Image: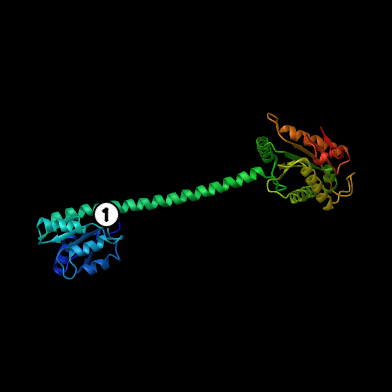
Amino acid sequence: MEKAPILLVDDRRENLLTLERLLEAPELLLVRAESGMEALEKTLDHQFALVLMDVQMPVMDGYETAELLRGNSKTRNIPIIFVTAARREQEHMFKGYDAGAVDYLLKPLEPSILKSKVGIFLEMYRQRQLLEEKTRELDAKILELEELKRKLEESNRKLQHLSSVDGLTGLFNRRHFDDTFLMEWKSAARRKSPISLIIIDIDHFKAFNDTYGHIAGDTCLQRVAKGLVSALHRPVDMVSRYGGEEFTVILPDTDIHGAEMLADRMRDIVLAMAIPHSSSSTGNFVTISAGVSTMVPRPGQPAANLLDAADKALYQAKESGRNCCRTNCDQPPPNDMAADRDCVR
């Protein structure tokens, strides 16, 4: 166990030797100071458990030294016991208490009383040290728990991300699409604003896999996914892998005209990649077909209506020869251009 340091302050060396002889014990570290100034200097090197100090000293007496100790944040809580043979009058004792003393010992010292009082303050010191140690341990545990909490939250974020992302393409997966689609549908219903959905299918993808192999098929899916994402200009728009070679695009606050323009741009981007597809009956390169639908959700109308409409439009695109976009909506195109668009009522 670490020794408890006690500061003995007296301008007479024989008095210091007497205190040392009476208090000597293996668990104590007794430190001498022969003046008030030296006592202050010793506090720079030790965190004392107790100060035993003579009142009458030249230059700086015990009262003044005690006041200076009390004025220092590092030493203000060290108990001070005055040891004196004079000034037994009550007014002088009160002066000592005002200066910061916690007790008086009168000379000649009674060994049993000295040891009893010192023992009380040593026990308080050990309890305080134990409390500080436990507080440090608790603080360390709190920091450890906070770090574990941070790591757990980071792991949860990563798991949440992994659970919502398609491992092959890096796009959001079907699960995340379902959650986001329903959320955006409800938001559009509250704001009475249009929401558009595009469903995209890679044309003759089974034939591509049969001709070039599944590894090439995976690479094709990845390239198409990047091309679809590159067509987006708003952070609120979201491309997802819907399953197999199908993709979906959610477009909040987008009318049918804007959705059709984006679908055409995506089709052009994929075609411009010039990914060879010798088994395609549509052309020599990989192409996509897209079904577009736009709705302003009505009260009680299910989100599945928009999904079904886009799926029907995709079917029409395939029936029309693929490598094209078709529209199925309940929102007329702007400028009364319905006659120029495939918009099924």
The image quarter in which residue 322 lies: top right
Q: Position of residue 65 (x, y in %)?
A: 21, 64
Q: Position of residue 203 (x, y in %)?
A: 84, 43
The image quarter in which residue 72 lies: bottom left
Residue in view at x 81 percent, y 49 percent: 270
Query: Is 99 in front, or is 270?
Result: 99
Q: Rate crowding at label 1 as few (under 14), some (14 to 19) or many (20 or more) other CA atoms within 10 Å.
A: some
Instruction: Please give left or right for residue 152 compared with residue 246 in the image.
Output: left
Q: Amino acid at mark 1?
A: Tyr
| Residue on which disc 1 sits | 125
Quadrant of the frame with the N terminus: bottom left
- The residue sitting at the front extreme is 335
**Where 259 sits versus 46, above or below?**
above
Instruction: Please give left or right for residue 195 compared with residue 96 in the image.
Output: right
**Where 41 sits versus 227, above or below?**
below
Instruction: Please give left or right for residue 35 compared with residue 45 in the image.
Output: left
Q: Position of residue 76 (x, y in %)?
A: 27, 58
Residue in view at x 43 percent, y 50 percent: 141
What is the tally of numbered marks visible in this picture?
Answer: 1
Q: Secondary structure at mark 1?
A: helix
Q: How is the image coloured?
A: rainbow
Quadrant of the frame with the C terminus: top right
The image quarter in which residue 114 lies: bottom left
Q: Is residue 68 something one can see in this rendering?
A: yes
